[in-house]
Image: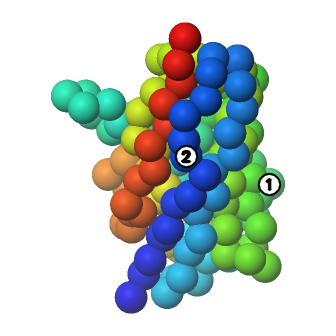
Amino acid sequence: QVQLVESGGGLVQAGGSLRLSCAASGLTFSSSAMGWFRQVPGNEREFVAAITWSGGSTNYAGSVKGRFTISRDNAKNTVYLRMNSLKPEDTAVYYCAAFPGYSGSGSRLYDRHEYHYWGQGTQVTVSS
């Protein structure tokens, strides 16, 4: 049974930082591309960042590029999202997702429908 468990969310002031973690189990983590998405009530879940299974390539949404950093530790089966210079518009539930068996680094990583497994989400609230 695949489980993705996010942690690290919370309340932070604008300009602050948070680091989200996602611990994976029940899948071959080292051969899974991983992504972070976020969702605000009433909106579709949107792409934030993705990383290839080796960690050699990363992708970011334009709205977070230069502020957020995705990374992974295959020895710990964990993917991270470091979020700096947070803005109120970053407020959302953040979800970790796994795309097993995909070795590419292209546009498929941006598509939430490509991801097979999802975590339960962690709330990030940025106050102004």
Tag shown at residue 56: 1
Image coordinates of residue 27 in percent, x first then y, are 52, 83
> Is 8 placed left or right of 119 in the picture?
right
Work out which quarter of the rendered image holds the N terminus and state it.
bottom left
Instruction: Bin the neighbour count of mark 1 within 10 Å (Cα to Cα): few under 14, some 14-19, many 20 and up.
Output: few
Residue at image location 54% in from the left, 52% down from the top: 35
Residue 44 in the figure: left or right of residue 46: left
Residue at left offset 68%, top offset 39%: 18
Circle count? 2
Q: Dot 1: what SS?
A: loop
Q: Where is residue 36 in the image (x, y as percent from the top left)?
A: 52, 47
**Rendering coords of residue 54 (x, y %):** 75, 65
Q: For this rendering, which residue is in front, 94 or 55?
A: 94
For image coordinates 74% across by 77% down, the residue present is 76
- Residue 102 in the image, given as x and y percentages of width and height: 54, 65
Element under disc 2: loop
The quadrant holding residue 92 is top left
Q: Residue 12 sits in which quadrant?
A: top right
The image's colour scheme reads: rainbow
Would you say 1 lies left or right of 107 here? left
Q: Specify which label sits upstream in the sequence, 2 or 1.
A: 2
Tag 1: amino acid: Gly
The correct choice, above or below, for 6 with respect to 125 in the image is: below
Instruction: State the residue position of label 2.
Output: 9
Screen quadrant of the C terminus: top right
* Picture disc at residue 29: none
In the image shown, does 114 or 24 lie closer to the viewer? 24
* Mark 2 vs mark 1, CA separation in Å: 26 Å
